[in-house]
């Protein structure tokens, strides 16, 4: 019995030693883990800091990418060509990642042909601290440039930006202004008139003498017409309400009427179309949208694409490219548009070769 007790005691002692050994091993393991964790803890702190930094940087990047950009759009008057320019601008920015209602807000304003309104609109944008101004046409661009020397101004539908005082050097803008010129080559325009009215001797020019862009273009047209042996008859207006009377004054004095990219006249184009149809007088325009609106023909460019061109320039500026590195661009890709219904109404037979060359026929 005593022997059994001794055996039991010995067995219990062995078990106790084994348990102690197990705890010791576990303790060493725990200590090692803690040490490892402590070492990792320094790493974890560093990693956490790096993660925080990374998150902060990413957050800043996200904030920069998602910053809502405010762009003021100022348009001198409503007419299809300028409307198309604005739409092209917005679509180009959308393609570049600036989506209206998400990360860009547009404040669209129309001066309705009034220079005082254009000035007020430009001053409003400055007061609102707009991130950019998109000015459509010469008068609104002049107002914008006078209103600010710091907010980026991108213009479009401006014939001669240097003569208008917007930039000193179109190839190297040195301030806060750049954009797209819609300087139309007048020779193709006059060649088209000659092709449509082969025996023409006198061409009527209808424009606003108060628009810098129109005057610059008309001077080029007059010089080119003279070189072709054509006589020029002029009729000028100061606002859209005078367009009908001015068009009527050309009846009997010319064999075709030329309307280039004059904002005032084009805004009242239906009046000119009416006079030309009633008097069988061909009307040749300086933009594609006017042909759609009833003019006989135009060898010109698409103002929607003109707006896209300006929008692509604006995207570069918003993404950090200095304006000094973005020279003024000029409209590209002239197209021939013909309106067959207008031809019939104005008593013109379109030559077959012109029909074949037409990019667009209405």
Image (spheres, rainbow, N blue to C red):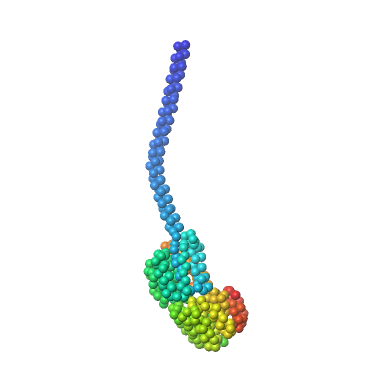
Q: How many marks?
A: 0
x, y percent for residue 173:
40, 70
357 displayed left or right of 12: right
Left-right relation of 59 to 342:
left
Q: Residue at x 41, y 65 (%)?
A: 128
In this rendering, does residue 131 appear at all? yes
Q: Give the residue displayed 44% in from the left and 59% down from the top.
A: 67
Above or below residue 280? Residue 14 is above
Residue 359 image-quadrant placement:
bottom right
Q: Identify the residue at image location x=54%, y=76%.
A: 290
Residue 343, compared with residue 150, is above or below; it is: below
The percent position of residue 83, horizontal first and vertical second, equals: 51, 71
Q: Quadrant of residue 151?
A: bottom left
x then y, percent, for residue 288:
54, 75
The one of 204 and 162 positioned closer to us in this rendering: 204
Image quarter hosting the C terminus: bottom right
Looking at the image, can residue 313 be seen?
Answer: no
Q: Residue at x 54, y 81 (%)?
A: 272
Picture coordinates of residue 220, whole percent (x, y): 47, 81
Q: Is residue 150 left or right of residue 294?
A: left
């Amino acid at each position: 019995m005593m022997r059994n007790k001794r055996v039991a005691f010995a067995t219990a002692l062995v078990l106790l030693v084994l348990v102690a050994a197990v705890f010791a091993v576990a303790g060493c393991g725990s200590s090692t883990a803690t040490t490892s964790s402590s070492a990792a803890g320094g790493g974890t702190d560093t990693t956490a800091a790096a993660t925080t930094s990374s998150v902060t940087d990413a957050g800043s990047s996200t904030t920069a990418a998602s910053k809502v950009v405010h762009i003021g759009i100022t348009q001198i008057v409503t007419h299809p060509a300028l409307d198309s320019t604005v739409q092209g601008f917005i679509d180009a920015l959308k393609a570049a990642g600036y989506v209206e209602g998400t990360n860009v807000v547009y404040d669209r304003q129309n001066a309705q042909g009034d220079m005082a309104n254009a000035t007020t609109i430009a001053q409003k944008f400055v007061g609102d601290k707009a991130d950019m101004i998109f000015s459509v046409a010469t008068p609104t661009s002049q107002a914008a440039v006078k209103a600010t020397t710091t907010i980026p101004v991108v213009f479009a539908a401006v014939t001669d930006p240097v003569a208008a005082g917007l930039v000193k050097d179109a190839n190297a803008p040195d301030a806060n202004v750049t954009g797209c010129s819609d300087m139309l080559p007048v020779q193709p325009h006059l060649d088209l008139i000659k092709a449509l009215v082969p025996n023409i001797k006198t061409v009527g020019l209808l424009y606003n003498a108060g628009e810098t862009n129109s005057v610059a273009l008309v001077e080029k047209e007059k010089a080119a017409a003279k070189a072709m042996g054509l006589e020029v008859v002029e009729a000028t207006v100061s606002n859209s309400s005078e367009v009908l009377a001015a068009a009527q004054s050309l009846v009997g004095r010319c064999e075709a009427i030329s309307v280039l990219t004059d904002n005032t006249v084009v805004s009242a184009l239906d009046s000119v179309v009416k006079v030309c149809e009633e008097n069988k007088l061909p009307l040749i325009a300086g933009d594609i949208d006017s042909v759609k609106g009833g003019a006989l023909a135009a060898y010109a460019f698409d103002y929607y694409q003109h707006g896209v061109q300006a929008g692509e320039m604006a995207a570069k500026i918003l993404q950090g490219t200095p304006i000094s590195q973005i020279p003024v661009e000029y409209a590209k890709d002239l197209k021939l548009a013909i309106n067959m219904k207008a031809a019939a109404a104005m008593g013109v037979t379109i030559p077959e070769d012109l029909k074949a060359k037409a990019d667009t026929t209405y």
